[in-house]
Amino acid sequence: LVQGLKVHSPKDYDYLCTGCVHGKSHCLPLPSASTSHYEKMELVVIDLTGPMNVSTWDGYVYALVVVEVSC
């Protein structure tokens, strides 16, 4: 996770919209992988989603999540 990142909101965004709360709450967990040990950068998981109905503060409607899996 990112540490030390300061986000300054131009508006009052202390609430969570219904879409954010329910976004992936209905998804079942993925099955366990057959390999439990990966070297650095051996497995990278990428998810692109959008367009969203609600944009970010800067007007973006797509989200890209990149996670490096290493054990």
Image (cartoon, helix red, strand yellow):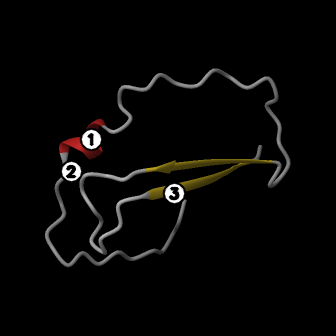
Inter-mark Cα distance, 1 to 2: 6 Å
Residue closest to the far left: 12
Relative to the observer, which residue lies in front, 69 or 61?
61
Name the residue type under label 3: Leu
- The residue depicted at 83 percent of the width and 48 percent of the height is 42
Residue closest to the far right: 39
Residue under pointer 1? 21
User: Residue 59: horizontal and vertical position, in percent?
Assistant: 30, 71
- The residue depicted at 82 percent of the width and 54 percent of the height is 40
Inter-mark Cα distance, 3 to 2: 20 Å
- The residue depicted at 68 percent of the width and 22 percent of the height is 32
The circle drawn on residue 32 is: none
Relative to the observer, which residue lies in front, 36 or 46?
46
Name the residue type under label 2: Leu
The circle drawn on residue 64 is: 3
Residue under pointer 2? 16
Q: Nearer the viewer, mark 3 or mark 1?
A: 3
* The C terminus sits in image quarter: top right
Residue closest to the far front: 51
Inter-mark Cα distance, 3 to 1: 18 Å
Between discs 3 and 2, the one toward the N terminus? 2
User: Residue 2: horizontal and vertical position, in percent?
Assistant: 53, 65
In this picture, residue 11 sits left or right of residue 52: left
